[in-house]
Amino acid sequence: EISDNILVIRNMTQGNSGWLQCSASDGNNRALTRKTMVNAIYFTTQFLEEPSNRTVPAGSLVITLTCTPPTSYPPAEVSWLKDGDPLTDENTLITPTGSLILHHLTTSNEGKFTCQARNDLLGVKALSRVAVLVITEPAIETPRNLPTTLWNDRNVYLTEGDTVTITCGVYGEEQPTITWYKGINQKITDSPASFPRFTISDDEYTLTIERVTMSDTATYLCIAENSVGSDEVPVSTPIWVVSSLQFT
């Protein structure tokens, strides 16, 4: 409304923001004031984009946790929290749009991340949903359970006819897929006809060899893979099969 040549905007909203200019006329002449920008101070609290849970391998060079803050005037100031506390990690960068970039990741980067937006003129703030960052990769350990006839100098000795079970100990945030090999290039997985005495458990964690023969002498490998990555190491020391054991 206009009263005594004064424009009064009541219940100011975002829609009232814009350039205003006063015009005066005596019927013959018209004069204009300079334009004035009027902005409503507001904060919508609803994030346009929020971060999501991420699982990445250790050693990753760069990942981004996305955050686009609520619509606000003045534009919202963005900061990040890790496990509820202000983020102080030096290996991080907040982009002009509010997303968080982390680089050269290690397990110390794991945690619960929250994007925080605030409008200091209104004294209000909003928090995004929590995004959990997990740093992981498949890893293969030495067998946890290898029943054998004899351990000697890190070699496993078996007598022909024995049964042996090799366990591939793995860990990973996401369940890995395991592939077994005899030696370097003989794939056991998906080749039952070629290895009739070999049985892989339903969960793929164990390999059982029944009625071992001398031809089974080898180093057995397992490869663990998931969407994060893969790892490969020998799951046991060499297995030697002999016709009989002699002690001296």
Image (cartoon, rainbow, N blue to C red):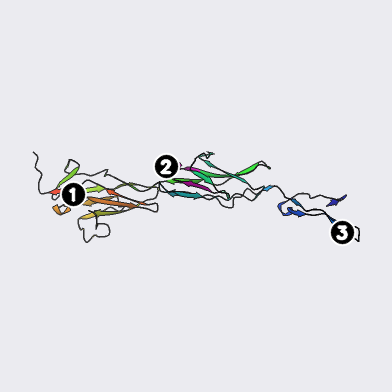
Return the mark for residue 107.
2
Question: Which badge, 3 or 1, comes first in the chain's sequence?
Answer: 3
Q: Secondary structure at mark 1?
A: loop
Residue, x 84% and y 52% (percent of image)? Answer: 2
Q: Is residue 124 left or right of residue 155?
A: right
* Amino acid type, residue under disc 3 in the picture: Arg
Residue bearing mark 1: 163
- Image-quadrant location for residue 86: top right
Q: Is residue 11 magenta?
A: no
State how far apart marks 3 and 2 are (Cα).
70 Å
Residue, x 14% and y 49% (percent of image)? Answer: 241
Density class for disc 3 (Cα within 10 Å; few <14, some 14-19, many ≥20) is few
Residue, x 15% and y 54% (percent of image)? Answer: 215
Nearest to the observer: residue 87 or residue 173: 87
Return the mark for residue 109.
none
Q: Position of residue 107 (x, y in %)?
A: 42, 42
Write the start and end of the magenta stretch as one range. 99-112
